[in-house]
Amino acid sequence: MKLERSKNILTFLGFDNEYKDANIVVFGSPFDGTTSFRPGTRFAPNIMRNESFGLETYSPYLDKDLEDIAVFDAGDLDFPFGNTKKVLEMINTFTQNIVKDNKIPVMIGGEHLVTLPAVEAVHKKHKNLHLLHFDAHTDLREDYMGEKLSHATVVKRIWDFLGDGKVYQFGIRSGQKEEFEWAKKHTKLTKFSCAGLKEAIKEIGDAPVYVTIDLDILDPSIFSGTGTIEPGGISFHEMMQVIKEIKNLNIVGADVVELSPHYDASGVSTAVACKILRELVLAI
Amino acid sequence: MKLERSKNILTFLGFDNEYKDANIVVFGSPFDGTTSFRPGTRFAPNIMRNESFGLETYSPYLDKDLEDIAVFDAGDLDFPFGNTKKVLEMINTFTQNIVKDNKIPVMIGGEHLVTLPAVEAVHKKHKNLHLLHFDAHTDLREDYMGEKLSHATVVKRIWDFLGDGKVYQFGIRSGQKEEFEWAKKHTKLTKFSCAGLKEAIKEIGDAPVYVTIDLDILDPSIFSGTGTIEPGGISFHEMMQVIKEIKNLNIVGADVVELSPHYDASGVSTAVACKILRELVLAI
Amino acid sequence: MKLERSKNILTFLGFDNEYKDANIVVFGSPFDGTTSFRPGTRFAPNIMRNESFGLETYSPYLDKDLEDIAVFDAGDLDFPFGNTKKVLEMINTFTQNIVKDNKIPVMIGGEHLVTLPAVEAVHKKHKNLHLLHFDAHTDLREDYMGEKLSHATVVKRIWDFLGDGKVYQFGIRSGQKEEFEWAKKHTKLTKFSCAGLKEAIKEIGDAPVYVTIDLDILDPSIFSGTGTIEPGGISFHEMMQVIKEIKNLNIVGADVVELSPHYDASGVSTAVACKILRELVLAI
Amino acid sequence: MKLERSKNILTFLGFDNEYKDANIVVFGSPFDGTTSFRPGTRFAPNIMRNESFGLETYSPYLDKDLEDIAVFDAGDLDFPFGNTKKVLEMINTFTQNIVKDNKIPVMIGGEHLVTLPAVEAVHKKHKNLHLLHFDAHTDLREDYMGEKLSHATVVKRIWDFLGDGKVYQFGIRSGQKEEFEWAKKHTKLTKFSCAGLKEAIKEIGDAPVYVTIDLDILDPSIFSGTGTIEPGGISFHEMMQVIKEIKNLNIVGADVVELSPHYDASGVSTAVACKILRELVLAI
Amino acid sequence: MKLERSKNILTFLGFDNEYKDANIVVFGSPFDGTTSFRPGTRFAPNIMRNESFGLETYSPYLDKDLEDIAVFDAGDLDFPFGNTKKVLEMINTFTQNIVKDNKIPVMIGGEHLVTLPAVEAVHKKHKNLHLLHFDAHTDLREDYMGEKLSHATVVKRIWDFLGDGKVYQFGIRSGQKEEFEWAKKHTKLTKFSCAGLKEAIKEIGDAPVYVTIDLDILDPSIFSGTGTIEPGGISFHEMMQVIKEIKNLNIVGADVVELSPHYDASGVSTAVACKILRELVLAI
Amino acid sequence: MKLERSKNILTFLGFDNEYKDANIVVFGSPFDGTTSFRPGTRFAPNIMRNESFGLETYSPYLDKDLEDIAVFDAGDLDFPFGNTKKVLEMINTFTQNIVKDNKIPVMIGGEHLVTLPAVEAVHKKHKNLHLLHFDAHTDLREDYMGEKLSHATVVKRIWDFLGDGKVYQFGIRSGQKEEFEWAKKHTKLTKFSCAGLKEAIKEIGDAPVYVTIDLDILDPSIFSGTGTIEPGGISFHEMMQVIKEIKNLNIVGADVVELSPHYDASGVSTAVACKILRELVLAI
């Protein structure tokens, strides 16, 4: 029987190691300040922790068990509301600390803009960093309604310091005509599917990689709990295939973003996000 | 900054031309009076206008942009409640006016019965009219609970004046045994899928075509917001493929019907309907 | 017009024969006492009856009509709450009575544990009974939190009396590592899909078969109304294929379990369950 | 244990007498064809039957038990869709039959227009009929968007044959200015509350009374499942008080209308409707 | 019948005058950037316009009709996301323009912070401005998680320039101890109810008043669609009473804020907000 | 900024003391095994912890702050599913341990049966124990569908060892006629309201009291998230009044039960439960 002497602890299922023992540090960035349509990704990390208990620790996809690896769940960062810049600084500092301790940061969003400071922090250590970007949207605008820092500009902002040839984009099915044109010259963009992944993996080789999964890459039939719904996405099976393929890359950071759980009352989107996080962490 | 001098205008995204300049006229027929199971398609056109702002105007499927074509959104017809005949007359008259001005009517339902008066109006001008009918249901009953005019009889009523060999049906997966038997002699019906579409396109050639898309042709995994749920439908990808294929036909009228948005609180069904409408209009 | 002299009768669509005339007896076991995550399967049989009126009696998949076969719907068993053993006894007795009258029992769950007493009852008559088990979960634990009788142990409990080589499992995508290991020796388990079905059908031949369909074998995109959501399941089309394939087996009992309808407000899960039940009954 | 020989019967809790023994006949009129805002009252009678099992048969308000009276539940009338006139005729005929057999009809709506043919049928026998009308809305328009027969005109249509001084209205808080003006001369209308009820009861004395309860008289805090939401209604306690007060009247017919259960996912509105129906029947 | 020549216009019911003719200008400020709990007030103004068609233009509370007054609905301001300061500037400029034209601004929020720039703009013209503040929360923090500009500090920021004795607060039932202490010296705060309103009205006399209604002053039984739920609020009847009482004040600006419509799927909260807006505008 | 070294801790807001320092120990009993209608109270304690962050620690009702008292939150007991007796034993043992350490147990249900073992444990120490029972239901059945241990029999089971004159019941509005009759002789039952509370408090004086609050005593307008909905309950204001009145009693144990949070998607019921728990703990 449970001892009544210790406080109630809530971590994502199986992410129950101590910080010092862990190779991977999971944390939540519950920010949705630049979301343009339906907000609510701020609720994702905590709901994922709560719902993770419907999962098993064992993955029949990878034939691996969370009990065999060491993951620490740091909980959520505690953001001010309405101050985008300060939020980004907090994520940056927090990620840098993890990286300094030679641990791999895995962030749970929040909206996609949270990826920017995390990649910046990882890039500080890994100068030859590549980005694998899974998403329905290009996220390549120069600004969005006048704002340079936005979920709709985040990959462009990352490109600003990674430069040409380092950014791979998959599953893209929505954006402005100009963004698709621009991508032809500066990123490697695969429309609708992840068809180009195998080639990308070959090109990247041993270089350090940051993997960012905007969950709206999935079809809304399986992932409706997100801000901007884009029919025509990849299936869960394809996502599992992606994770199997990237597991031999040198992943030095990762995130899973854009779950807005209140918009899917059935709980399917949260279950999908939980399983993808489990597989992603097992793959790293 | 927005000028405060003009009233608030709400059109479907990008359908913002003036009537005189437009080639295509979109309008809503918010009628669900003969719906037999779950009503609510009356809400579809207006919710689609409101939610269309989650869309981009650019289609990566067709590589076309709504900004390059001229569409006018006339809003919704203002129907009396409980008087089926009068509603049908109003749609007929309204569609005739559009056709007379040499514009193409694209109607947003409402339930499927609204297609009858629109096709009648178009047929008045285009005597050799063909019908492309995408649907989960046969809609070929002679009457439904004694009523000749019903969403379950609508294609039979259209056949009454188009006659044999002009009606093509796709995706059909529900109906009475008698309807399937009848279809063998009088329409060209493809069960479950849109497999017969290419052949149909060849047969039709340059003849004028009215395209009616009952959105429940889609699988409820991606389109649950409809009156009668029929698992086993086509995917969104298949729907996009259909639209690509029909774009070279001589389409003189079209509609998208049977979205019942309140039954899909996630908003996915509405997003699907919006994207299909965007693609359909771009294809015309 | 309806006569006002007889009480209101509610049966599943088309299951309206008298007991004495029926070959198949459908009944509900609204029990969810060992559900570990989201309860509510108790509501399934009744909601399925109510929603079945959205169905047609004719199946275009099997080209058969419910009007051509004789099915009796006995309603739901009336269980005490909180007493697992008594519930199991009641199901066992009820099923035995059906079997004694040379009718085929088709049970609507409830959670998966209800399958145990039904299979026991059928096994009493059919000693060489085989089990076809469609599910997302192994259900092969020896105990669950100390309990021998649980939805998570049900197939292990059935194996206890059927023994090795009689249990076929399909679509399994979640369980403990130990369960998957154990299954390698004692059951015939197909991970993720129903790929091994054809071979299983050959092996079984004329032997009596009990078919248990845990609806969570389906992908949550089409079936979200269940206790524990497991992305990565089979599609509705695959399920229809399964039913077509098993229709030549000697099915002596069957069930459809684990619909928890309140968790899918769109009604899709209930519609899916209804159609699978219609097809299953037509296939028997 | 339940006998498996008889078909599944579904009546409202405790309304399980045979027709010949019953003094009160309950039936459903699932019609919502003239609903102008949110449809769905068609689902009310059946959902009320299903949910009535959360009730006790004993009322601590009236200190009476359903087991001590004889009520028959005839189920729902089976209406054609889209044909308002035929629906009204069916209700009229059905109600006349009940009245002829010297039983009291208690109808479950459906929308408010169903009250018209029921009152007509009762009026045929009881020439001095009075109407007690509980509602948020005046329902006194001469026509609604050109239609004479509408939920918004129903009390005016009843006044057409009952005449001045026979119609009492309570709880009214929405309508056109003209309707309120008209009511001053022709009906006895109490705004916002049921304050005038005691006096009305005195005036009516022994005369036959038809009681129609549009459930939207209740505040949406306790009854949100309705077509047109009108904040500012009476409380459930006040409704119970009303029923206590009218129980000595000579009630010869009654109805409870305008529950649209899908719009209140919590189930509160349905529970409220069930309890009011139980109390109303006990009061008669 | 509707003419098809003019674009679809969407205004709040009855607010259909031209700008030049109007005395009152309604506009939406769809901003929820500092919301700390459940976001979504950005959707309020547009959903209110859409749902306002369930209202009548006539108020039986005030015996007034919207058709007798001149209101212009300017639609929503078009904000950048994630830039709080710019949003506040846009509201300020927009409100100033209205005030300059001698019209009364009535703003639909959005979260409560939008009140700050509107009051600033009105205060520029009306130096002796008083604030009537209806709310569940004190909103008197000096900063919130380090931010000076927040929905939780908004009344403190207004006090910064209005000063002592000008701010009246009603219905307050949640806040920090320090805020309640501070209010004792600087504002006139009534806990839980609006008991002090009559006295406040006397004190204010002819002075110009800005009325800000945070709808969460209402009990969540009638208003659940808001960010932070505080049981124990005032009833809708009490709110109507408040509006009746303030109608003789010299109101020079007003707003209705904090409806987060997605959190109340029943639509009650939106209906409540619409009716309060109708009454407020009629009272001005 | 948050330190990343410590695991994520989740306690109810402000219940963050260490066990040794605490006077009050809060724990969750997530059991709903005998729930007869809508299950799901198992989710209550955890959701209440998550949602408690919408609360302030300060109560303007009692003018007290959670920061001034010492409460420890032990998390939830970890129950087996489907074994009612074992669950009751676990609660009993756990509560005894708290009582032995001279701390006051405050339990969060779960369904009402969990109160039985907690009261038994407290009674072991406090022989003259009285029970204050707030509820919509009598809970006085001798058995429910044959079961002695049920949410519908719990107060009868407690009476078995407390005996006549020790049980006070308030707000009761549903039950069998026999239960109400029995209560007249053996308990002190107030129908519908808490009118008899003041007198009860006088009678009890200094005797030890266990307070059990079945939240369905509240009207479903403010508390719809529960298994069996009973319109006609007390208001939140009345509940606050109750807590103010009992704060001078010698409370030695308490619980708050029957929140079934999934049935109230708006979150109001959870917010109500959280505030009542805060007030109850502050009152003790």
Image (cartoon, coloured by chain):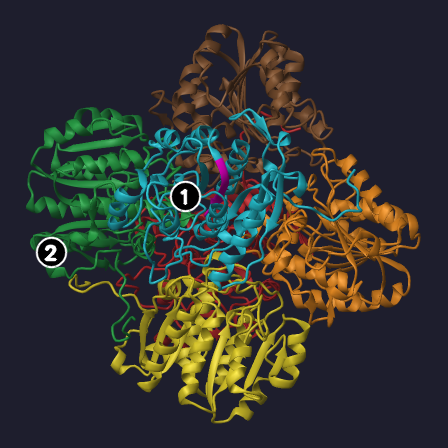
Chain colours: A red, B yellow, C orange, D cyan, E green, F brown
Q: Evaluate whether residue A57 shows in this view.
A: no
Label 1: state its secondary structure. helix
Q: Where is residue D6 in the image (x, y as percent from the top left)?
A: 77, 47
Query: Disc 1 residue type?
Result: Asp
Q: Disc 1 and disc 2: Cα gap in Å?
A: 42 Å
Magenta residues, as a range?
A: D251-258
Chain designation of label 2: E
How many numbered discs, if any?
2
- The residue identified by callout 2 is E97
Q: Does the magenta stretch include residue E118?
A: no
| Residue wearing tag 1 | D216
Residue A180, percent from left and from top:
39, 75
Q: Where is residue C18 in the image (x, y as percent from the top left)?
A: 79, 53
Whether residue B148 is visible: yes
| Circle number at residue E32 | none
SS category of the residue bearing label 2: helix
